[in-house]
Image (cartoon, rainbow, N blue to C red):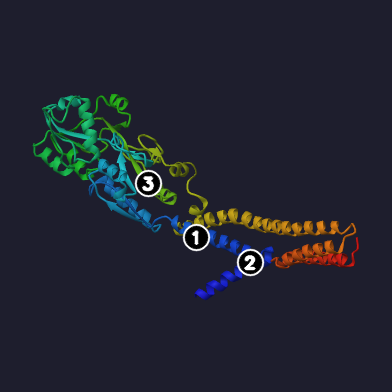
Amino acid sequence: MALDRKLGFSKLQTLFAEIFGLSRTVALCASILVVGVAISAIYWSFHQAPPSVITITSGPEGSIFFRNAERYQKILARSGIRLKILSSEGSSENLKRLSDPSSRVDIGFVQGGVAAGMKIDDLQTLGSLYSSPILLFYRSAAPFDLLSQLSGKRIAIGSVGSGSHALALSLLAANGIEPDGSTTLENLDAEDASKALVAGKLDAVFLMGESSPPEVMRSLLRTPGIRLYSFSQADAYVRRMVYLNKLDLPRGVIDFEKDIPSRDISLVGPTVELVARAGLHPALSDLLLEAAREVHGGAGLFRRQGEFPTPLEHEFRISPDALRFYKSGKSFLYRSLPFWMASLANRILVVVVPMVVVLIPALRSIPALYRWRIRLIIYRWYRALLAIERDTISPREAGERVELLDRLNRIEQAVNRMKVPASFADQFYVLRGHIAFVRERLKKGQP
């Protein structure tokens, strides 16, 4: 095997020498250049291949975040990409994982409003996926009009690390309700909090889809004595907290027969974004956005058909690859070929074009530089030969002729030691003929 490689390299070297008129040393350098560029291009091609496994941080099992991740998993599997799903407490924990390089998480669902005070320079969003309202269920004989009326109550605000926990604290703080005050704030997950509310152990619970199974929220909507809070100051919250949106839940939209809800409800909530690390492969970005369109592109309670995903920029900068996808969709190769084949073809093109750009000018310049060098050497000996011939014009003593012959002999010896490629054979032999011509003139003493 080693002998075959040696013979193959020797043939390449000979090929360069014969085609371009190079010496074996220069041909060796050109061969090394070609082989080096080819190896570098092949390595780069394999290095730039999209990974076949990526990891998403979602939410608690059974939550909307987790269910959406499972749908993404099935869609990506069609293209041969395996999506590993990590459960979490919610948006805050997802963001912490994405910000920590050692966590080896590639993407995650993050709701707006949880990034305050965190380092997010290396993160970018692929777009907003949907609006996620925060739902406040409470037990009361009469409807509450203001959040400040919860002061002194027992309230569940979600698990630490969830987006509902962070948003609930912000909303309560805006209404003068702090963790260390007279109000009891419980860090309970959705199921425990809903059971405690039904049992009368809590007065109110904050729930969001990121950490709450849909069944829990539907159950509370149908439970007698439990009310869903309508944000009477929704417009003001949206103005003060720019990451929030106003959302409307029309009367009867949950259940026409039982008239649930029994009145129009005003809600507020952030959008949920698909956040990725800056190094996400462009091909995977396209696949994920395709999956997002399939999962979130339909109409729903809080979105119109085709409204999401959308490149809204809030706390995270938009990925350039995502912007390109929103403007023009996938590239021609990825539209026309299966994912693995398009990825391979794309890398081949990316490798071949730089090789052509680098190698052709380099290989064209090597022979030109080498021919220029050989001509300089030949012209140098011609200048020395012309100097001797000029010295023969005037009559010379015998001793002077001997000195000229000695100079000519040194020129001839140097020329004979020259290594000249076949392409310069004509000039080489003409030079030797001229040396012989000058020698004959010296011997005959002709001017």
The crowd level at tag 2 (other Cα within 10 Å; few <14, some 14-19, many 20+) is some
Secondary element at tag 2: helix
* Residue 369 spot, x, y in % from top left: 67, 56
Identity, as a three-letter code, of the amino acid under mark 1: Ile
C-alpha span from label 2 to label 1: 26 Å
Residue 444 can be seen in this image: yes
Image location (x, y in percent) of residue 192: 14, 43
Q: Which mark is residue 24?
A: 2
Report x, y in % for residue 325: 46, 44
Q: Which residue is mark 1?
A: 42
Tell me which residue sits at (19%, 26%) in the image.
147
Q: Helix, strand, or loop for circle 3?
A: helix
Residue at mark 3: 292
Q: Earlier in the sequence, mark 2 or mark 1?
A: 2
Q: Nearer the viewer, mark 1 or mark 3?
A: 1
**Looking at the image, residue 328 lies above or below residue 43:** above
User: Eyeballing the image, is 278 above or below 148?
Assistant: below
